[in-house]
Each structure stands twice: as C-alpha cells, then as structure tokens.
Image (cartoon, rainbow, N blue to C red):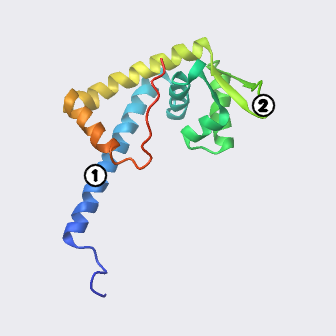
C-alpha cells in the first residue's frame, strides 16, 4: 500500500472520538424517546410530530413540513398522521388558500398528550444530561455543538 493510504494513529484516534460522540448522542436520544414512549405511549415519530405541531403557529403545519421534520417519505408521514388522527390527536384538512395542501392541526386532546410527552422528555433530559453536566456545562455543550451546525438552524419556541 502506498504512503498515506492508511489513516495515521492520530487520524484513527480522531475517528474514534467522533464515533464516541455521535454514538453517545444517538443512544442518549434513543433513551429519552424510550422514556417518553414508556411513560406516555407516544412513539418516537409521533413525539417528533407532536413536538413540531406544539411549536407551530396555531398548532398547525403543512403535511410537507411534517414530512421534512420527520425525515420520512410522503407515505411514511401519512402513516404517522393516520395513527395520530385515529388516536384523536390531530385533524387534517385542505388549506383554504390551496386545496392541494393538507394542513395538520393538534386537537385539544393532542395538545394535552403532546404537553405530557414534552414534560416527560424534559424530565428525562434534565436527569440524563443536564444534571450530570450541570446547567452551565450543558449550555456550553449545546453552544459548542450548535456552533458546528452548517445549517445554522434556529429553534422555534412555541407555547
């Protein structure tokens, strides 16, 4: 093999650090979502959808926006929306401005369930991440990692 074909020891160490960081985040996020599902019965994809709707104006969003947040195909998003509608958590209706656009809106029951799921998530987040790092340490971690975000996405505050 030619020179430079294999990663150096320093490169391998950097790859291990990256793997440790992204793996730890993925596992932590999975545990937080597991906590929500165990406590409220809300699946991870349903939680993401409800969380997004809570932070949307008038608790309403386009199905296409929901699809983008979930990272699902149109068919996958429709399945999630079908389950949420069957549970009475959302209502779907065509947009008055463009009948081709389907709007998804939280019902009162959906807002109650979403609020409970969010409280559960926040409790688990505080226990599993904020308390071990401390409030300032957690804030610094968020600031550091957010500073690396090439999209520079902000967050919606919602209710």
Q: Point out which mark residue 20 bears.
A: 1
Name the residue nearer the viewer: 123 or 100: 100
Q: Which image quarter holds the N terminus?
A: bottom left
Q: Is residue 147 left or right of residue 98?
A: left
| Residue in view at x 37 percent, y 35 percent | 31
| Residue in view at x 32 percent, y 28 percent | 125
Q: Is residue 69 above or below residue 35?
A: below
Say what secondary structure mark 2 lies in. Answer: loop
Q: Point out which mark residue 98 bears.
A: 2
| Residue in view at x 28 percent, y 30 percent | 128
Q: Is residue 137 left or right of residue 64?
A: left
| Residue in view at x 55 percent, y 16 percent | 111
Say what secondary structure mark 1 lies in. Answer: helix
Q: Point out which mark residue 77 bears.
A: none
Name the residue nearer the viewer: 34 or 110: 110
Q: Nearer the viewer, mark 1 or mark 2?
A: 2
Structural crowding at the residue carrying mark 1, measured as other residues with C-alpha within 10 Å and reported as few (<14), some (14–19) or many (≥20): few
Where does residue 27 sit, x and y in percent of width and height?
A: 35, 42
Q: Is residue 59 above or below residue 15?
A: above
Structural crowding at the residue carrying mark 2, measured as other residues with C-alpha within 10 Å and reported as few (<14), some (14–19) or many (≥20): few
Task: Specify the quadrant of the image occupied by residue 84.
Answer: top right
Where does residue 58 sit, x and y in percent of width and height?
A: 60, 18
Identify the mark nearer the N-term, 1 or 2: 1
Where does residue 44 sit, x and y in percent of width and height?
A: 49, 33
């Amino acid at each position: 093999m030619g020179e430079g074909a294999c990663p150096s020891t320093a490169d391998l160490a950097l790859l291990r650090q990256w793997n440790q960081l992204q793996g730890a985040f993925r596992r932590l996020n999975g545990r937080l979502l597991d906590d929500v599902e165990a406590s409220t019965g809300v699946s991870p994809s349903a939680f993401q959808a409800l969380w997004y709707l809570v932070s949307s104006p008038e608790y309403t969003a386009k199905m296409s926006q929901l699809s983008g947040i979930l990272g699902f195909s149109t068919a996958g998003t429709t399945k999630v929306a079908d389950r949420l509608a069957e549970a009475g958590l959302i209502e779907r209706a065509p947009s008055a401005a463009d009948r081709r656009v389907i709007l998804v809106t939280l019902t009162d029951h959906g807002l109650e369930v979403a609020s409970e799921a969010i409280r559960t998530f926040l409790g688990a987040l505080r226990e599993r991440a904020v308390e071990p790092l401390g409030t300032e340490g957690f804030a610094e971690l968020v600031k550091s990692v957010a500073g690396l975000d090439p999209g520079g996405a902000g967050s919606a505050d919602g209710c």
